[in-house]
Image (tube, helix red, strand yellow):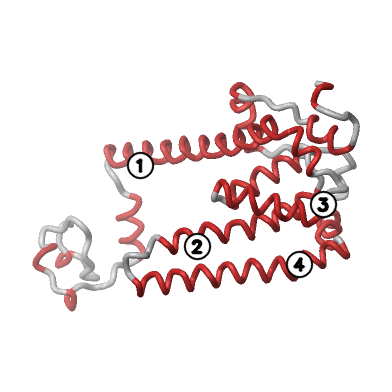
Amino acid sequence: VKSRKDRPTGSTHFGDADWDEERPDEIGDATWGEVAKACCVHDAKEWGKIFVGACGALFFLYFFLFALELLGNSAKVLGGCRAGGLLSDETNPVAGLVIGELATALIQSSSTTTSIIVSLVGADAVSVNSGIYLVMGANIGTSVTNTIVSMGQMADGAQLERAFAGATVHDIFNLLSVAILFPLEVISHYLYHLTNAMLPDSVGDGEKWEGPIKKIVSPFAGRVLKANKDVIKDIATGKVDSCDAY
């Protein structure tokens, strides 16, 4: 069927012979059966394109996860010793907040900073307490990014005003959130206790859960760059005095 006139519902499909002759008031609604047929019925060439597109999406998704894993390993290798001294359990919470803020402002990505923090905490290189303050700092540091983006509208005064107002709303929201939650965490450690309460009883102290994505990505990333995960932990806990021990 290549014309809406031959369909009971009078619906229009892309590629109809009378596509250019139709008026909006003559076009009917398609049934769910027609929608499913249009979406799922393809010839061999179209299915081949869909398969290639799906494989391409999985390929780039894998290397995106691989890049995050490699970025985390790079942070452990390049800043292991200094991070161990800065991110011990005795670190001032304000210092952890500022470190997370500066790291995010430098790399312009709070998601990347958070991914690195999660990988460091998962590797037992950074304590959960320090990780909480770092993530809070990352939420403040990401405010720099939207302000820079809003400045890109300087050619039009009206657009700059709206863009900067939107960026300011985002900044104030992040700042107020941290201003409220940070003192509560310093006083009560409620987020730390909440994470312990969420931990399953089947997981014992010192046990680690390795997700399926990490099992797929880590072997390849380990061939490119392999970090000593004990460096940050040993320095932070005082087990060794410096990196000269390695």
Side of 116 where 92 appears, left or right? right
As shown in the figure, which amino acid type bears the numbered disc 1? Ile
Q: Which mark is residue 65?
A: none
Few, some or many residues within 10 Å of mark 1 (<14, 14–19, 20+): few
Query: Which residue is the site of mark 1?
Result: 50
Q: Residue at x 10, y 62 (%)?
A: 18
* Mark 1, secondary structure of its residue: helix
The answer for how far apart the CA atoms under marks 1 and 2 are is: 39 Å
Q: Is the C-beta separation of discs 3 and 1 under 8 Å?
A: no
Q: Which mark is residue 129?
A: 3
Question: What secondary structure is found at the residue carrying circle 4?
Answer: helix
Image quadrant where residue 185 sits: bottom right
Which is nearer the N-term, disc 3 or disc 1?
1
In the displayed structure image, the side of residue 178 where residue 85 appears, left or right: right
1 or 4: mark nearer the eye: 4
Q: Which residue is mark 2?
A: 147
Q: Nearer the viewer, mark 3 or mark 1?
A: 3
Q: In which image quadrant can residue 210 be found?
A: top right
Q: Which residue is mark 4?
A: 181
* Place of residue 93 in the rendered image (x, y in percent of width and height, measured from the top left): 80, 55
Of circles 2 and 4, the one toward us is 2
Depicted 89 relative to depicted 222: above or below:
below
Asked which secondary structure carries label 3, the reply is helix
Q: CA distance from mark 3 to mark 4?
A: 14 Å
Rate crowding at label 4 as few (under 14), some (14 to 19) or many (20 or more) other CA atoms within 10 Å: few
> Which mark is first along the chain, 2 or 3?
3
Residue at coordinates 62% horizontally, 35% vertically from top-left? 69
Structural distance between the alpha carbons of marks 1 and 4: 47 Å
